[in-house]
Amino acid sequence: MGIIRYLKPGFFIYECFRITILAFTLVYLLPGTSAIPWMGIAAPQALFPLMALFICLDTVKYKAFLPLFIAGKSIGIISLLGWSIIFGQAKIIGGYSNAFILAELILLAGDFLSLATAFLIKKMEDKQCE
């Protein structure tokens, strides 16, 4: 139970870091174009830090967010992996910076850790309810 006390704030901090990186990436990649359509696509990502905050503050009260968080993270990981597989060759040929590829891998690893943390919190909460 003690490790969960440290994982919850880390869980929230990672989600805030992730949404910040996503926003800066959108601003950096689209300097001359309108970012409104892209922000509309990225806006649902702001729900993950909110869910992580509520789970961090009171897990018992907001444990209904855990399955939603797990489902959203799973869909995000699958879509990022699909994107990487489909457009990975274009990135290499098109001369994209290795920084983008590295950032994608770091965010993917962070998403896996975030998903594992959500599963661990859910498991601990289910064990407490028994």
Image (tube, rainbow, N blue to C red):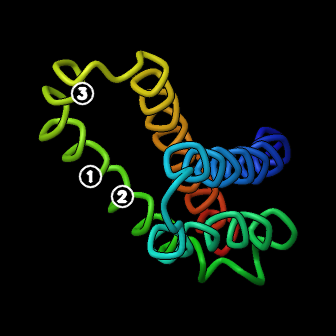
The span from disc 3 to disc 1 (Cα, nearest Å) is: 19 Å
Q: Which residue is mark 3?
A: 91
Instruction: Specify few, some or many for label 2: CA neighbours under 10 Å numbering under 14, 14-19, or 20 or more.
Output: some
Q: Residue 78, labelled with which disc?
A: 1
Q: Secondary structure at mark 2?
A: helix
Place of residue 24 in the rendered image (x, y in percent of width and height, measured from the top left): 65, 47
The span from disc 2 to disc 1 (Cα, nearest Å) is: 6 Å
Q: Which is nearer the N-term, disc 3 or disc 1?
A: 1
For the point 77% across and 42% down, the residue is 10
Q: Secondary structure at mark 3?
A: helix
Q: Quarter of the image holding residue 6?
A: top right
Q: Quadrant of the C terminus?
A: bottom right
The amino acid marked with disc number 1 is Ile
Depth order, front residue of 2/63: 63
Q: Is residue 6 above or below residue 98?
A: below
Q: Which residue is mark 2?
A: 74
The span from disc 3 to disc 2 (Cα, nearest Å) is: 24 Å
The amino acid marked with disc number 2 is Ser
